[in-house]
Amino acid sequence: MKIVVIGGTGLIGRQLVSDLVDRGHEVLAASPGTGVNSVTGEGLAPSLAGANVVIDVSNAPSLADDEVVTFFQTSATNVALAARKAGVAHAVLLSIVGTDRLQGSSYFRGKQAQEAAFAHSGVPFTIVRATQFFEFLGTIADGCTRDGVAHLPTFALQPIAASDVAATLADVAQSEAVNGIVEIAGPERAPLVEFVGTWLGHRDDSRAIVPDAETGYFGVPADDRTLVPGAGARLLPTRFEAWLTAQPARQQA
Ligand SMILES: NC(=O)c1ccc[n+]([C@@H]2O[C@H](COP(=O)([O-])OP(=O)(O)OC[C@H]3O[C@@H](n4cnc5c(N)ncnc54)[C@H](OP(=O)(O)O)[C@@H]3O)[C@@H](O)[C@H]2O)c1
């Protein structure tokens, strides 16, 4: 099959492209650097000519309130429209578990708009909502750090390895569209402070940690149900400890 990966040069995109190539598909890694811009539309129609599947794993380059919503809305609308015009048989989108419960955040309002553009595109679609990537725990730590102290939320997290996300997207791309949402998560659930604390310890990061039951998720109130998937979620195999062991202990300067 010909498969176009929008955002094919990013964290998930690179692994997804490699996985799909290994499975024998003709794959186009689409990003501004490869001449495809989903916001301006540059290169989009030619890239999708003859494509069977498009997978959107793009991310907003700016997280500023108005820019992030505009990015996801514009990009997804352009991708969905171009996919319909090209006669693509399946449009797959990577989103986030709990998107509908985090609408106090402009990022998640952007993700909701992105989902809506795919769902209303007229193209058979599958929205894959993943939990937080193990690779994202450092960003969460930094986002919770003030004056060198990490004030880490205590609500539940069920993070997932980026490699498992990429492999699942490849599986979904080879399957029939579900015209709905599929949730995926890692195999273990624990308080966020435990995952991030373990990650910081593994990296010899000496910043102080304060568990904080009042801290939300990037400014949005959250509880034990907000970021974890429902009962029907697919749980992927990579355990946090195994992933951690494969990571370098300390970030190179
Ligand atoms: N972080 C998490 O824990 C998490 C959890 C669940 C789902 N997600 C979702 O996963 C998705 C992928 O995340 P990621 O970490 O892999 O992102 P990433 O590493 O930041 O990669 C983003 C990709 O989007 C491309 N891109 C940016 N602007 C574009 C444009 N105008 N046109 C086409 N491509 C463009 C980038 O291209 P360049 O390389 O050229 O800039 C890059 O290939 C995001 O939508 C995110 O919401 C994230």
Image (spheres, rainbow, N blue to C red):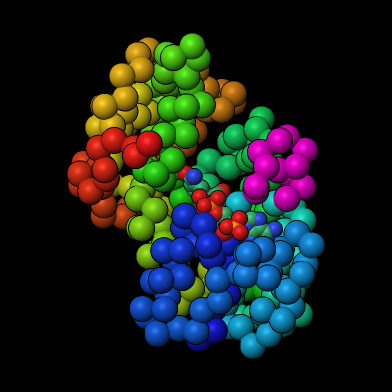
Residue 7, compared with residue 221, is above or below; it is below
Of 169 and 210, which appears nearest the observer? 210
At horizontal 73% and vertical 50% (from top left) the residue drawn is 71
Q: Nearer the viewer, residue 191 or 40?
A: 40
Span highlighted in magenta in the image: 60-71
The x and y percentages for residue 204 are: 26, 27
Q: Position of residue 37 (x, y in %)?
A: 71, 64
Residue 148 at x, y percent in the picture: 44, 14
Which quadrant does the C terminus fall into?
A: top left
Q: Residue furthest front?
A: 253
Near-viewer residue (225 or 194): 194
**What residue is shown at x 67% (from left), y 42% (from top)?**
62
- Residue 232 showing in the rendered view: no
Q: Specify whether residue 22 is in view.
A: yes
Question: In the rendering, at what x and y percent does residue 213 appear?
Answer: 43, 15
Q: Quadrant of residue 166?
A: bottom left
Q: Confirm whether the magenta stretch covers residue 175.
A: no
Look at 39% across and 53% down and name the residue there: 162
Is 209 situated left or right of 222 in this image?
A: left
